[in-house]
Image (cartoon, helix red, strand yellow):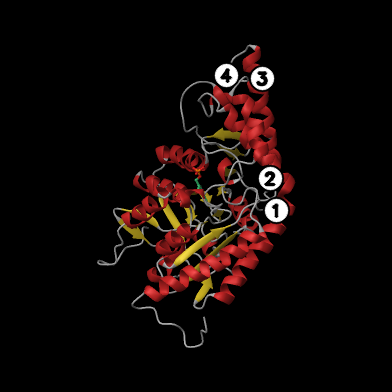
Protein backbone atom coordinates (compact mmCIF):
# COMPACT_ATOMS: atom_id res chain seq x y z
CA UNK A 1 0.00 0.00 0.00
CA UNK A 2 2.71 2.48 0.92
CA UNK A 3 3.67 4.68 -2.04
CA UNK A 4 7.22 3.93 -3.13
CA UNK A 5 9.87 6.62 -3.32
CA UNK A 6 12.24 7.06 -6.22
CA UNK A 7 15.85 6.65 -5.09
CA UNK A 8 17.46 10.06 -4.76
CA UNK A 9 14.11 11.74 -4.13
CA UNK A 10 14.28 11.14 -0.41
CA UNK A 11 13.88 14.24 1.68
CA UNK A 12 15.50 14.29 5.08
CA UNK A 13 12.89 14.75 7.77
CA UNK A 14 15.14 16.68 10.10
CA UNK A 15 14.82 19.73 7.80
CA UNK A 16 11.57 20.49 9.59
CA UNK A 17 13.21 19.75 12.94
CA UNK A 18 15.81 22.48 12.25
CA UNK A 19 13.11 24.97 11.27
CA UNK A 20 11.03 24.24 14.37
CA UNK A 21 14.12 24.67 16.53
CA UNK A 22 14.58 28.08 14.91
CA UNK A 23 10.94 29.03 15.59
CA UNK A 24 10.89 27.99 19.19
CA UNK A 25 14.30 29.43 20.05
CA UNK A 26 13.09 33.00 19.37
CA UNK A 27 10.72 34.41 21.99
CA UNK A 28 9.35 37.06 19.57
CA UNK A 29 8.25 34.28 17.20
CA UNK A 30 6.65 32.42 20.07
CA UNK A 31 4.77 35.52 21.22
CA UNK A 32 3.25 36.64 17.90
CA UNK A 33 -0.44 36.08 17.18
CA UNK A 34 -0.66 32.87 15.21
CA UNK A 35 -3.33 31.81 12.77
CA UNK A 36 -4.40 28.19 13.14
CA UNK A 37 -5.70 26.55 9.96
CA UNK A 38 -5.00 22.95 10.98
CA UNK A 39 -8.28 21.97 12.65
CA UNK A 40 -8.30 18.56 10.95
CA UNK A 41 -5.17 17.74 12.97
CA UNK A 42 -6.81 18.82 16.20
CA UNK A 43 -9.12 21.52 17.53
CA UNK A 44 -8.78 23.79 20.55
CA UNK A 45 -10.95 22.67 23.45
CA UNK A 46 -14.08 24.85 23.52
CA UNK A 47 -14.26 27.00 26.70
CA UNK A 48 -17.70 25.51 27.48
CA UNK A 49 -16.12 22.04 27.26
CA UNK A 50 -13.34 23.09 29.65
CA UNK A 51 -15.98 24.40 32.09
CA UNK A 52 -17.90 21.13 31.91
CA UNK A 53 -14.73 19.08 32.49
CA UNK A 54 -13.12 21.08 35.30
CA UNK A 55 -15.22 19.77 38.23
CA UNK A 56 -14.25 16.22 37.23
CA UNK A 57 -10.57 17.13 37.48
CA UNK A 58 -11.01 18.41 41.04
CA UNK A 59 -13.87 17.89 43.53
CA UNK A 60 -15.84 15.36 41.44
CA UNK A 61 -13.03 12.82 41.29
CA UNK A 62 -15.04 9.66 41.93
CA UNK A 63 -14.60 6.38 40.10
CA UNK A 64 -17.74 5.83 38.03
CA UNK A 65 -17.81 2.19 39.20
CA UNK A 66 -17.92 3.01 42.92
CA UNK A 67 -21.25 2.59 44.64
CA UNK A 68 -20.86 5.54 47.02
CA UNK A 69 -21.97 9.09 46.28
CA UNK A 70 -18.63 10.13 44.73
CA UNK A 71 -18.91 7.22 42.30
CA UNK A 72 -22.60 7.76 41.58
CA UNK A 73 -21.99 11.39 40.62
CA UNK A 74 -19.25 10.34 38.22
CA UNK A 75 -21.54 7.60 36.83
CA UNK A 76 -24.35 10.11 36.27
CA UNK A 77 -21.94 12.40 34.38
CA UNK A 78 -20.74 9.53 32.17
CA UNK A 79 -24.30 8.47 31.37
CA UNK A 80 -25.33 12.08 30.58
CA UNK A 81 -22.37 12.26 28.15
CA UNK A 82 -23.51 8.99 26.54
CA UNK A 83 -26.87 10.62 25.84
CA UNK A 84 -25.18 13.72 24.39
CA UNK A 85 -23.04 11.63 22.02
CA UNK A 86 -26.05 9.51 21.04
CA UNK A 87 -27.95 12.74 20.23
CA UNK A 88 -25.20 13.86 17.84
CA UNK A 89 -25.44 10.58 15.90
CA UNK A 90 -29.19 9.89 16.25
CA UNK A 91 -28.26 6.69 18.09
CA UNK A 92 -29.50 5.23 21.38
CA UNK A 93 -27.33 5.86 24.47
CA UNK A 94 -26.81 2.11 25.03
CA UNK A 95 -25.25 1.94 21.54
CA UNK A 96 -22.38 4.29 22.51
CA UNK A 97 -19.09 2.81 23.83
CA UNK A 98 -16.48 5.26 25.10
CA UNK A 99 -12.92 4.61 23.91
CA UNK A 100 -9.52 6.30 23.98
CA UNK A 101 -10.14 7.96 20.60
CA UNK A 102 -10.61 7.42 16.88
CA UNK A 103 -7.76 4.93 16.56
CA UNK A 104 -9.13 2.59 19.22
CA UNK A 105 -12.67 2.90 17.84
CA UNK A 106 -11.48 1.94 14.34
CA UNK A 107 -9.37 -0.96 15.66
CA UNK A 108 -12.22 -2.24 17.83
CA UNK A 109 -14.76 -2.10 14.99
CA UNK A 110 -12.57 -3.86 12.43
CA UNK A 111 -10.80 -6.44 14.61
CA UNK A 112 -14.03 -7.01 16.54
CA UNK A 113 -15.96 -8.10 13.45
CA UNK A 114 -13.24 -9.89 11.48
CA UNK A 115 -11.05 -11.68 14.02
CA UNK A 116 -13.73 -14.09 15.34
CA UNK A 117 -14.54 -15.07 11.74
CA UNK A 118 -10.89 -15.84 11.00
CA UNK A 119 -10.98 -18.39 13.79
CA UNK A 120 -13.77 -20.40 12.14
CA UNK A 121 -13.04 -19.66 8.46
CA UNK A 122 -9.74 -18.35 7.19
CA UNK A 123 -11.48 -16.59 4.30
CA UNK A 124 -12.94 -13.45 5.87
CA UNK A 125 -12.87 -10.52 3.45
CA UNK A 126 -12.94 -6.76 4.08
CA UNK A 127 -13.86 -4.04 1.60
CA UNK A 128 -12.28 -0.66 2.30
CA UNK A 129 -10.77 2.23 0.33
CA UNK A 130 -7.28 3.37 -0.58
CA UNK A 131 -7.81 6.74 1.14
CA UNK A 132 -8.63 5.61 4.68
CA UNK A 133 -6.78 6.96 7.68
CA UNK A 134 -3.88 4.80 8.90
CA UNK A 135 -6.06 3.72 11.84
CA UNK A 136 -8.15 1.77 9.32
CA UNK A 137 -5.51 0.96 6.68
CA UNK A 138 -3.00 -0.48 9.11
CA UNK A 139 -5.68 -2.40 10.99
CA UNK A 140 -6.81 -4.01 7.72
CA UNK A 141 -3.19 -4.75 6.85
CA UNK A 142 -2.67 -6.39 10.27
CA UNK A 143 -5.70 -8.60 9.58
CA UNK A 144 -4.30 -9.46 6.14
CA UNK A 145 -1.26 -10.89 7.95
CA UNK A 146 -3.66 -12.98 10.05
CA UNK A 147 -5.26 -14.46 6.92
CA UNK A 148 -8.04 -12.02 5.98
CA UNK A 149 -8.19 -10.68 2.44
CA UNK A 150 -8.78 -7.00 1.88
CA UNK A 151 -9.97 -5.03 -1.17
CA UNK A 152 -8.59 -1.49 -1.07
CA UNK A 153 -10.95 0.23 -3.50
CA UNK A 154 -9.55 2.95 -5.73
CA UNK A 155 -11.18 6.39 -5.75
CA UNK A 156 -11.93 8.88 -8.53
CA UNK A 157 -9.96 12.07 -9.20
CA UNK A 158 -12.49 13.80 -6.93
CA UNK A 159 -11.75 11.30 -4.16
CA UNK A 160 -15.00 9.33 -4.33
CA UNK A 161 -15.47 5.57 -4.23
CA UNK A 162 -17.12 4.11 -7.29
CA UNK A 163 -20.23 2.24 -6.14
CA UNK A 164 -20.03 -0.18 -9.08
CA UNK A 165 -16.50 -1.13 -8.02
CA UNK A 166 -17.70 -1.52 -4.44
CA UNK A 167 -20.52 -3.84 -5.51
CA UNK A 168 -18.10 -5.82 -7.70
CA UNK A 169 -15.62 -6.23 -4.84
CA UNK A 170 -18.15 -7.96 -2.58
CA UNK A 171 -17.69 -11.72 -2.26
CA UNK A 172 -19.68 -14.38 -0.42
CA UNK A 173 -17.12 -14.20 2.40
CA UNK A 174 -17.15 -10.38 2.72
CA UNK A 175 -17.64 -9.73 6.42
CA UNK A 176 -17.17 -5.97 6.66
CA UNK A 177 -17.33 -2.84 4.55
CA UNK A 178 -15.40 0.02 6.16
CA UNK A 179 -15.50 3.33 4.31
CA UNK A 180 -14.60 6.65 5.91
CA UNK A 181 -17.23 9.40 5.97
CA UNK A 182 -15.05 12.51 5.38
CA UNK A 183 -11.44 12.27 4.31
CA UNK A 184 -8.98 14.01 6.62
CA UNK A 185 -6.80 15.42 3.82
CA UNK A 186 -9.35 16.40 1.18
CA UNK A 187 -12.55 16.77 3.20
CA UNK A 188 -14.40 14.73 0.56
CA UNK A 189 -17.57 13.09 1.86
CA UNK A 190 -18.54 9.62 0.65
CA UNK A 191 -22.16 8.74 -0.09
CA UNK A 192 -22.65 6.50 2.93
CA UNK A 193 -26.42 6.19 2.38
CA UNK A 194 -25.92 4.23 -0.85
CA UNK A 195 -23.09 2.13 0.63
CA UNK A 196 -25.31 1.39 3.64
CA UNK A 197 -28.04 0.15 1.30
CA UNK A 198 -25.59 -2.16 -0.50
CA UNK A 199 -24.23 -3.51 2.81
CA UNK A 200 -27.74 -4.10 4.19
CA UNK A 201 -28.89 -5.86 0.99
CA UNK A 202 -25.95 -8.26 1.26
CA UNK A 203 -26.14 -8.57 5.05
CA UNK A 204 -22.58 -7.29 5.55
CA UNK A 205 -21.44 -5.27 8.56
CA UNK A 206 -20.89 -1.60 7.70
CA UNK A 207 -18.43 0.61 9.61
CA UNK A 208 -17.47 4.20 8.96
CA UNK A 209 -14.64 6.29 10.37
CA UNK A 210 -16.51 9.54 10.97
CA UNK A 211 -13.68 11.19 12.93
CA UNK A 212 -13.48 14.04 10.39
CA UNK A 213 -17.18 14.43 9.69
CA UNK A 214 -18.68 14.43 13.19
CA UNK A 215 -19.59 18.00 14.04
CA UNK A 216 -19.02 19.18 10.44
CA UNK A 217 -21.85 17.42 8.65
CA UNK A 218 -25.01 15.74 9.99
CA UNK A 219 -24.75 12.03 10.89
CA UNK A 220 -27.80 9.84 11.28
CA UNK A 221 -26.65 6.27 11.92
CA UNK A 222 -30.02 4.50 11.37
CA UNK A 223 -30.68 6.46 8.15
CA UNK A 224 -27.20 5.53 6.84
CA UNK A 225 -27.75 1.88 7.90
CA UNK A 226 -24.47 1.87 9.79
CA UNK A 227 -23.59 -0.90 12.22
CA UNK A 228 -20.45 0.76 13.57
CA UNK A 229 -19.11 4.32 13.53
CA UNK A 230 -16.00 5.92 15.05
CA UNK A 231 -15.63 9.45 16.42
CA UNK A 232 -12.90 11.30 18.33
CA UNK A 233 -13.37 14.18 20.78
CA UNK A 234 -10.29 16.20 19.83
CA UNK A 235 -11.54 16.81 16.30
CA UNK A 236 -14.73 18.44 17.58
CA UNK A 237 -13.45 20.89 20.22
CA UNK A 238 -13.17 18.25 22.93
CA UNK A 239 -10.12 16.83 24.72
CA UNK A 240 -7.52 14.46 23.26
CA UNK A 241 -7.44 10.76 24.13
CA UNK A 242 -11.18 10.10 24.23
CA UNK A 243 -13.64 9.00 21.57
CA UNK A 244 -16.60 6.75 20.99
CA UNK A 245 -17.68 3.78 18.95
CA UNK A 246 -21.32 3.49 17.93
CA UNK A 247 -22.31 -0.19 17.96
CA UNK A 248 -25.80 -0.90 16.61
CA UNK A 249 -27.82 -3.01 19.03
CA UNK A 250 -27.54 -6.70 18.20
CA UNK A 251 -24.17 -6.44 16.40
CA UNK A 252 -21.89 -9.41 16.93
CA UNK A 253 -18.79 -7.39 17.82
CA UNK A 254 -16.08 -9.03 19.89
CA UNK A 255 -14.64 -6.96 22.71
CA UNK A 256 -11.18 -5.58 22.06
CA UNK A 257 -9.80 -5.03 25.56
CA UNK A 258 -10.13 -7.47 28.45
CA UNK A 259 -10.31 -6.38 32.05
CA UNK A 260 -12.94 -5.36 34.56
CA UNK A 261 -16.65 -4.80 34.27
CA UNK A 262 -16.64 -1.21 33.03
CA UNK A 263 -19.06 -0.38 30.20
CA UNK A 264 -20.73 -3.75 30.84
CA UNK A 265 -17.35 -5.47 30.45
CA UNK A 266 -17.39 -4.68 26.76
CA UNK A 267 -14.78 -1.93 27.00
CA UNK A 268 -13.09 -2.32 30.37
CA UNK A 269 -10.86 0.28 31.98
CA UNK A 270 -11.75 2.91 34.58
CA UNK A 271 -13.72 5.54 32.70
CA UNK A 272 -11.89 8.75 31.79
CA UNK A 273 -14.69 10.72 33.42
CA UNK A 274 -13.47 14.25 32.66
CA UNK A 275 -12.62 13.28 29.08
CA UNK A 276 -16.00 11.59 28.56
CA UNK A 277 -17.79 14.62 30.02
CA UNK A 278 -15.75 16.78 27.61
CA UNK A 279 -16.70 14.60 24.65
CA UNK A 280 -20.37 14.76 25.66
CA UNK A 281 -20.34 18.55 25.94
CA UNK A 282 -18.44 18.85 22.64
CA UNK A 283 -21.01 16.60 20.94
CA UNK A 284 -23.89 18.65 22.33
CA UNK A 285 -22.28 21.92 21.16
CA UNK A 286 -21.49 20.42 17.75
CA UNK A 287 -25.05 19.33 17.17
CA UNK A 288 -26.49 22.65 18.38
CA UNK A 289 -24.15 24.81 16.28
CA UNK A 290 -23.80 22.56 13.22
CA UNK A 291 -25.93 24.54 10.78
CA UNK A 292 -24.45 27.94 11.69
CA UNK A 293 -20.85 26.66 11.85
CA UNK A 294 -21.22 24.92 8.50
CA UNK A 295 -22.48 27.98 6.64
CA UNK A 296 -19.85 30.31 8.17
CA UNK A 297 -16.90 27.94 7.65
CA UNK A 298 -17.93 27.10 4.09
CA UNK A 299 -18.06 30.77 3.13
CA UNK A 300 -14.61 31.45 4.68
CA UNK A 301 -13.14 28.28 3.12
CA UNK A 302 -14.54 29.32 -0.28
CA UNK A 303 -13.05 32.78 0.17
CA UNK A 304 -9.65 31.28 0.99
CA UNK A 305 -9.84 28.91 -1.95
CA UNK A 306 -10.97 31.41 -4.58
CA UNK A 307 -8.56 34.02 -3.20
CA UNK A 308 -5.61 31.64 -3.53
CA UNK A 309 -6.64 30.52 -7.01
CA UNK A 310 -6.79 34.20 -8.04
CA UNK A 311 -3.51 35.25 -6.39
CA UNK A 312 -1.24 32.26 -6.91
CA UNK A 313 -0.48 31.06 -10.44
CA UNK A 314 -0.17 27.34 -11.06
CA UNK A 315 -2.27 26.21 -8.13
CA UNK A 316 -5.19 23.76 -8.03
CA UNK A 317 -7.74 22.53 -5.53
CA UNK A 318 -7.78 18.77 -4.87
CA UNK A 319 -11.09 16.97 -4.44
CA UNK A 320 -13.11 20.03 -5.48
CA UNK A 321 -15.46 17.94 -7.63
CA UNK A 322 -16.95 16.10 -4.63
CA UNK A 323 -19.13 17.07 -1.68
CA UNK A 324 -16.70 18.25 1.02
CA UNK A 325 -16.67 19.16 4.69
CA UNK A 326 -17.13 22.94 4.95
CA UNK A 327 -13.78 23.60 6.62
CA UNK A 328 -11.21 21.84 4.42
CA UNK A 329 -9.27 22.77 1.31
CA UNK A 330 -6.26 20.98 -0.13
CA UNK A 331 -4.21 22.73 -2.78
CA UNK A 332 -1.29 21.81 -5.00
CA UNK A 333 1.20 24.66 -5.54
CA UNK A 334 3.25 23.44 -8.48
CA UNK A 335 7.01 23.71 -8.13
CA UNK A 336 7.24 23.86 -4.36
CA UNK A 337 7.71 21.31 -1.58
CA UNK A 338 4.66 21.18 0.68
CA UNK A 339 6.84 20.65 3.75
CA UNK A 340 8.90 23.74 2.87
CA UNK A 341 5.70 25.79 2.47
CA UNK A 342 4.36 24.58 5.83
CA UNK A 343 7.63 25.65 7.47
CA UNK A 344 7.74 29.00 5.64
CA UNK A 345 4.13 29.71 6.70
CA UNK A 346 4.84 28.66 10.27
CA UNK A 347 7.67 31.20 10.36
CA UNK A 348 5.14 33.84 9.20
CA UNK A 349 2.68 32.72 11.91
CA UNK A 350 0.27 30.50 9.96
CA UNK A 351 -0.23 26.82 10.90
CA UNK A 352 -1.34 24.38 8.21
CA UNK A 353 -0.14 20.93 7.15
CA UNK A 354 0.73 18.43 4.46
CA UNK A 355 -0.63 14.91 4.36
CA UNK A 356 2.89 13.62 3.91
CA UNK A 357 4.14 11.08 6.38
CA UNK A 358 7.69 11.05 7.59
CA UNK A 359 8.90 7.48 7.78
CA UNK A 360 12.35 5.91 7.71
CA UNK A 361 14.00 9.30 7.28
CA UNK A 362 12.09 10.19 4.10
CA UNK A 363 8.99 12.22 3.36
CA UNK A 364 6.54 9.97 1.55
CA UNK A 365 3.89 11.60 -0.62
CA UNK A 366 0.39 11.35 0.82
CA UNK A 367 -1.33 8.03 0.01
CA UNK A 368 -4.59 9.97 -0.37
CA UNK A 369 -3.24 12.36 -3.00
CA UNK A 370 -1.52 9.60 -4.96
CA UNK A 371 -4.79 7.60 -4.79
CA UNK A 372 -6.68 10.45 -6.50
CA UNK A 373 -4.09 10.30 -9.27
CA UNK A 374 -1.58 13.00 -8.39
CA UNK A 375 1.99 12.18 -9.40
CA UNK A 376 4.35 12.02 -6.39
CA UNK A 377 5.86 15.42 -7.24
CA UNK A 378 2.42 17.12 -7.16
CA UNK A 379 1.37 15.22 -4.06
CA UNK A 380 4.52 16.55 -2.37
CA UNK A 381 3.62 20.08 -3.54
CA UNK A 382 0.26 20.02 -1.73
CA UNK A 383 -0.88 21.64 1.48
CA UNK A 384 -4.07 21.36 3.53
CA UNK A 385 -5.79 24.30 5.20
CA UNK A 386 -8.54 23.35 7.66
CA UNK A 387 -10.63 26.09 9.25
CA UNK A 388 -12.44 26.01 12.55
CA UNK A 389 -15.45 27.33 14.41
CA UNK A 390 -13.46 30.35 15.59
CA UNK A 391 -11.62 31.20 12.33
CA UNK A 392 -12.25 34.86 11.43
CA UNK A 393 -12.48 36.68 8.13
CA UNK A 394 -9.47 38.81 9.15
CA UNK A 395 -7.43 35.61 9.59
CA UNK A 396 -8.41 34.43 6.12
CA UNK A 397 -7.41 37.82 4.65
CA UNK A 398 -4.03 37.59 6.40
CA UNK A 399 -3.57 33.95 5.35
CA UNK A 400 -4.18 34.83 1.70
CA UNK A 401 -1.30 37.30 1.70
CA UNK A 402 0.99 35.00 3.71
CA UNK A 403 0.48 32.09 1.33
CA UNK A 404 0.87 34.25 -1.78
CA UNK A 405 4.16 35.66 -0.47
CA UNK A 406 5.53 32.33 0.77
CA UNK A 407 4.78 30.49 -2.49
CA UNK A 408 6.34 33.32 -4.54
CA UNK A 409 9.44 33.27 -2.31
CA UNK A 410 9.87 29.49 -2.51
CA UNK A 411 9.37 29.49 -6.27
CA UNK A 412 11.92 32.28 -6.73
CA UNK A 413 14.45 30.06 -4.96
CA UNK A 414 13.60 27.00 -7.03
CA UNK A 415 16.12 26.21 -9.77
CA UNK A 416 13.48 24.29 -11.72
CA UNK A 417 10.21 26.23 -11.35
CA UNK A 418 9.14 27.94 -14.59
CA UNK A 419 6.58 30.71 -14.30
CA UNK A 420 3.57 30.08 -16.56
CA UNK A 421 3.67 32.49 -19.54
CA UNK A 422 0.28 34.01 -18.61
CA UNK A 423 1.18 34.81 -14.97
CA UNK A 424 1.63 38.45 -14.01
CA UNK A 425 2.33 37.84 -10.32
N1 LIG B 1 -9.49 8.72 11.54
C1 LIG B 1 -9.34 9.89 10.93
C2 LIG B 1 -10.01 10.15 9.64
C3 LIG B 1 -8.50 10.87 11.50
O1 LIG B 1 -8.34 12.03 10.89
C4 LIG B 1 -7.87 10.58 12.73
C5 LIG B 1 -6.95 11.55 13.35
O2 LIG B 1 -6.21 12.23 12.67
C6 LIG B 1 -8.09 9.33 13.33
C7 LIG B 1 -8.91 8.42 12.70
C8 LIG B 1 -7.44 8.95 14.62
O3 LIG B 1 -8.14 9.56 15.71
P1 LIG B 1 -7.40 9.72 17.12
O4 LIG B 1 -6.39 10.81 16.95
O5 LIG B 1 -8.50 10.12 18.07
O6 LIG B 1 -6.82 8.41 17.48
Q: Is residue 53 above or below residue 408?
A: above
Q: Work out whether mark 4 precedes mark 3 in sequence or the reverse, and give the earlier one.
A: 4
Whether residue 130 is visible = no
> Alpha carbon of mark 1 to alpha carbon of mark 4: how far?
35 Å
Q: Residues within 10 Å of mark 4 (few under 14, many from 20)?
A: some
Q: Which residue is mark 3?
A: 73
Q: Nearer the viewer, mark 1 or mark 3?
A: 1
> Alpha carbon of mark 1 to alpha carbon of mark 2: how far?
9 Å
**Residue 82 occupies which quadrant of the picture?**
top right
Q: Residue at x 36, y 43 (%)?
A: 146
> Alpha carbon of mark 4 to alpha carbon of mark 3: how far?
9 Å
Q: Position of residue 231 (x, y in %)?
A: 58, 43
Whether residue 287 is visible = yes
Q: Which residue is mark 4?
A: 63
Q: Work out whether mark 1 precedes mark 4 in sequence or the reverse, and give the earlier one.
A: 4
Q: Residues within 10 Å of mark 3 (few under 14, many from 20)?
A: some
> Alpha carbon of mark 1 to alpha carbon of mark 3: how far?
33 Å
Are the two marked residues, 1 and 3, in contact with CB atoms closer than 8 angstroms? no
Disc 4 is placed on an element classified as loop
Q: Position of residue 205 (x, y in %)?
A: 56, 46
Disc 2 is placed on an element classified as helix
Q: Which residue is mark 2?
A: 286
Are the two marked residues, 4 and 2, in contact with CB atoms closer than 8 angstroms? no
Nearer to me, 256 or 56: 56
Disc 3 is placed on an element classified as helix
Nearer to me, 229 or 409: 409
Q: Is residue 319 above or below residue 25?
A: below
Q: Residues within 10 Å of mark 2 (few under 14, many from 20)?
A: many
Are the two marked residues, 1 and 2, in contact with CB atoms closer than 8 angstroms? yes
Disc 1 is placed on an element classified as helix
Q: Work out whether mark 3 precedes mark 2 in sequence or the reverse, and give the earlier one.
A: 3
Q: Residue furthest left?
A: 7
Amino acid sequence: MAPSLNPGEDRACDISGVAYLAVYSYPELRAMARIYLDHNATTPVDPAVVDAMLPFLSGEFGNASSIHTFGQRARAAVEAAREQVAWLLNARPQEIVFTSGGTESDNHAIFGIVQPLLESSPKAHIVTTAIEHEAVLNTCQALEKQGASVSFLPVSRAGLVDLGALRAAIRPETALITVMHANNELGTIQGLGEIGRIAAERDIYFHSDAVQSAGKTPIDVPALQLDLLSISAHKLYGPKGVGALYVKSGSRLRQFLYGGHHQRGFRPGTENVSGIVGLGKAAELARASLAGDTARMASLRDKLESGLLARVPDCRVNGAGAPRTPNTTNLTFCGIEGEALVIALDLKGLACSTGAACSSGAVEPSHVLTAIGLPASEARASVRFSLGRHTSEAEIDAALEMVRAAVAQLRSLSPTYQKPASAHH
